[in-house]
Amino acid sequence: MSKYDKLKPDFSKGLLTVILQHYTNKEIRMVGYMNEEAFELTKQEEVAWFYSRSKERLWKKGESSGNVQYVKDMYLDCDQDALLVMVDPAGPTCHTGTDSCFNLDSSFPLKDIEATIQNRAASSDNDSYTNYLLSKGIDKIAKKFGEEAFEVVIGAKNKDKKEVANEAADVLYHLGVLLHHSGVSVSEVESVLANRHKKQNNFKGERKDVQEW
């Protein structure tokens, strides 16, 4: 029994087009194809399997390199003939050694910060700055967050763009630690933002009590 049993691809149209996307930064990693057997293996093992059109065989992504693509979620499109697979890659996805098969600029959003902090916290690494902050508790974490936020203000007052960018990165990291300590996920924050955006769009021009962004 798999949590993906509800997905019913339409294999009557041929092979299923599959897009691999990083589950946190949403980077498109690769495009491949699955037959029904590859899809079933992907469901059961929760790692990405494909069907090679050139070699006419099943293959598991990372079977040679070890860079397995662990499945975090899967979504079928409206016609049930294309599959979006959200993955946590064990390493580069492309056979050339790059993260993506596409020439994409790298990104590192809040969810990647969150994942990094979670990994550090789970490691119990005494040399980790993240674990140092978490061990000191909310007073230390809040103090550091406030200090870094003030550094952004100083950079802005000095009209120093590089300093603002560097200090803003520190602010986001310390915000991530504060959220982790408080048990608040980035998804919860995103949900609040999405709801505010939705309300603003729904009531724009109709109500005066919905704050414009």
Image (cartoon, helix red, strand yellow):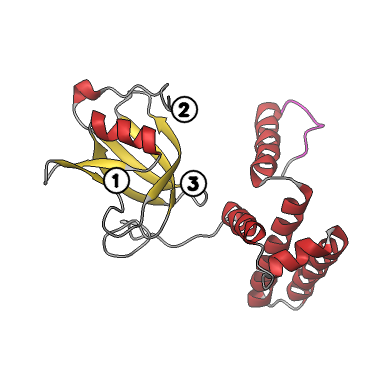
Q: Is residue 202 above or below residue 121?
A: above
From mark 3 to mark 1, how far is it between C-alphas?
15 Å
- On residue 182, which mark appears? none
Q: Position of residue 198 (x, y in %)?
A: 65, 32
What residue is shown at x 70% (from left), y 65% (from top)? 130
Q: Which quadrant of the figure has residue 4?
A: top left
Q: Are marks 3 and 1 in contact (CB under 8 Å)?
A: no
**Quadrant (top left/top right/bottom left/bottom right) for the C terminus:** top right
Which residue position is annotated with label 2?
A: 3
Q: Which quadrant of the figure has residue 197?
A: top right
136 sits left or right of 36 in the view: right
What residue is shown at x 46% (from left), y 27% (from top)? 3
Indicate whether residue 209 is drawn in magenta. yes
Q: Secondary structure at mark 2?
A: loop
Q: Position of residue 113 (x, y in %)?
A: 61, 58
- Within 10 angstroms of label 2, few (less than 14), some, or many (20 or more) residues? few
Magenta segment, which residues? 204-211
Q: Position of residue 167 (x, y in %)?
A: 70, 71
Which residue position is annotated with label 1?
A: 31
- On residue 23, which mark appears? 3
Q: Secondary structure at mark 3?
A: loop
